[in-house]
Amino acid sequence: MIGALPAMMSPDMAATDSHALVLTTASSRDEANAIANVLLERRLAACVQFVAIDSAYVWQDEVVREPEVLLIVKTRAELFDEIGAAVVELHSYDVPEVVLVPMQAGLGPYLAWIDDATT
């Protein structure tokens, strides 16, 4: 655990080890939309946010700089493998980013909404 939760969280906040964010990038808004639609239709995500970004990375021994779209997927941690498989299936990249970021806590009703939307 990166840091301890506050000893006294407000009553509306809840500790969690079952919720997570999944980060992935797409080469275009169209690709991001296609990935998001499948994740939502399969109920693997409660929400997918898009952020236009500029990326610089090493690929095949070359430095590459290009625009991408970051997808932030709100979900349950147990769905990570299915999300990863869907991203790989739909993605244009040979090696897409698929990273799980566990949530430590969140607003209780928000976490319940994620549960409802992904079951």
Image (spheres, rainbow, N blue to C red):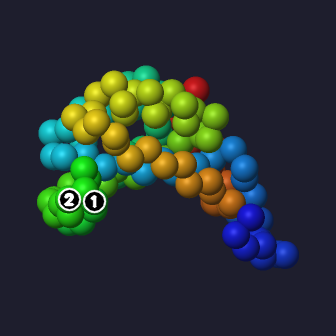
Q: Quadrant of the N terminus?
A: bottom right
Above/below status of 82 relative to 30: above
Q: How many numbered marks, from 0 up?
A: 2
Front-lying residue, 69 or 47:
69
Residue placed farthest to the front in the image?
Answer: 61
Q: Where, by quadrant of the figure, is residue 52 drawn?
A: bottom left
**Callout 1, which amino acid?**
Val
The CA distance from mark 2 to mark 1 is 5 Å
**Callout 2, which amino acid?**
Glu
Determine which residue is flagged by label 2: 62
Residue depicted at 40% across the width and 27% down the height: 86
Do labels 2 and 1 touch, CB within 8 Å? Answer: yes
User: Dot 2 lies on which element?
Assistant: strand
Q: Tell me, for residue 58, which label it has, or none.
A: 1
Residue 59 pos. (x, y %):
26, 53
Residue 109 pos. (x, y %):
63, 51
